[in-house]
Amino acid sequence: MKAQARASGATFEEIVGASGPNPEYAEALMLFGQFVGSWDVESTQFATDGKQRRLRGEWHFFWALEGRAIQDVILAPRRDERSRDLWRGGEYATTIRFYRPATGTWDITSISPPNDQVHRLVARQRGDDIVLHGTAPDGRREIWTFYDISADRCRWRGQISSDGGHTWFTDEEMVLTRKGP
C-alpha cells in the first residue's frame, strides 16, 4: 500500500495524519488530543475466578483525518517483547475517536484483529474523567474510563456487566506513563 501511495505523490501518513487539532473545534478535540504521543502501559487483567495477569505494553495516539479525529494503536506485550506468532497473547488494536459537535460526545470504534473484536462506544467528559459507554462484542454492556489524568500519567479501567448494568466487574486496569510527545 505504501508503494501505491508514493506513486500517487503522497504517503499514508500525509493522507491520514494531521499535525494538530482542526481549528474549528480545537478546544473540544483536546479531550482526547491531550493523549497524543507515546505511552508505556502497565496492565493488570482480572478473570472472574480471581486470577490476574500482568502485561507491559505501549499505546500511541496520533492526530488523524485533518485533525478531526484521534487514532491510536495499543500493543501488549510491547513490540520488543512480542512474538509474531503469538496472536492471542495480549492486544494489538487500533481505535478511531472523533468528536460530534452536535452532541458534545465522541464516537469511538476500536478494532482488535487478534481478538476478533470490534467495540463501539460513546465518550463524554465527566468531571476530570473521560467515560466511554458501549456494548461489548458479546452483547454485554461495557464502560472504559480514563481517570487520574495528568500531562505525564493517567489510569484506564475497563468494566463489564453481565446483568444489564446492575453490577460491574473490572476486567482490566492500566497505568499509562508518557514516553514522549
Image (tube, rainbow, N blue to C red):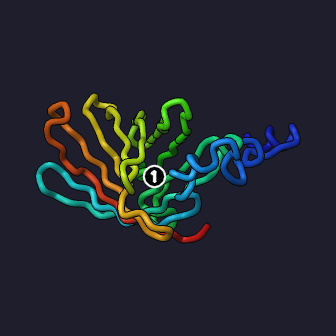
Q: Residue 51: which quarter of the image?
A: bottom left
Label total for image: 1
Q: Give the residue displayed 48% in from the left and 53% down from the top.
A: 74
Q: Give the residue displayed 46% in from the left and 59% down from the top.
A: 83
Q: Residue furthest left?
A: 49
Q: Position of residue 119 (x, y in %)?
A: 40, 36
At label 1, counting other C-alpha atoms closer than 10 Å, the crowd grade (few under 14, some 14-19, many 20 or more) is few
Q: Using residue 68 as the reference point, say whether residue 35 is left or right of it.
A: left
Quadrant containing the N terminus in the rendered view: top right
Q: Give the residue displayed 42% in from the left and 33% down from the top.
A: 120
Q: Using residue 131 as the reference point, say whether residue 26 is left or right of it.
A: right
Asked which secondary structure carries label 1, the reply is loop
Q: Residue 128: which quarter of the image?
A: bottom left
Q: Give the residue displayed 46% in from the left and 40% down from the top.
A: 110
From this view, report whether residue 175 is shown above or below residue 171. Answer: below
**Which residue position is annotated with label 1?**
85
Quadrant containing the C terminus in the rendered view: bottom right
Nearest the viewer among 20 and 177 is: 20
Nearest the viewer among 30 and 50 is: 30
Q: Residue 162: which quarter of the image?
A: top left
Q: Position of residue 108 (x, y in %)?
A: 47, 38
Amino acid under disc 1: Asp
From this view, report whether residue 174 is shown above or below residue 64. Answer: below
Q: Position of residue 66 (x, y in %)?
A: 71, 42
Q: Position of residue 164 (x, y in %)?
A: 19, 31
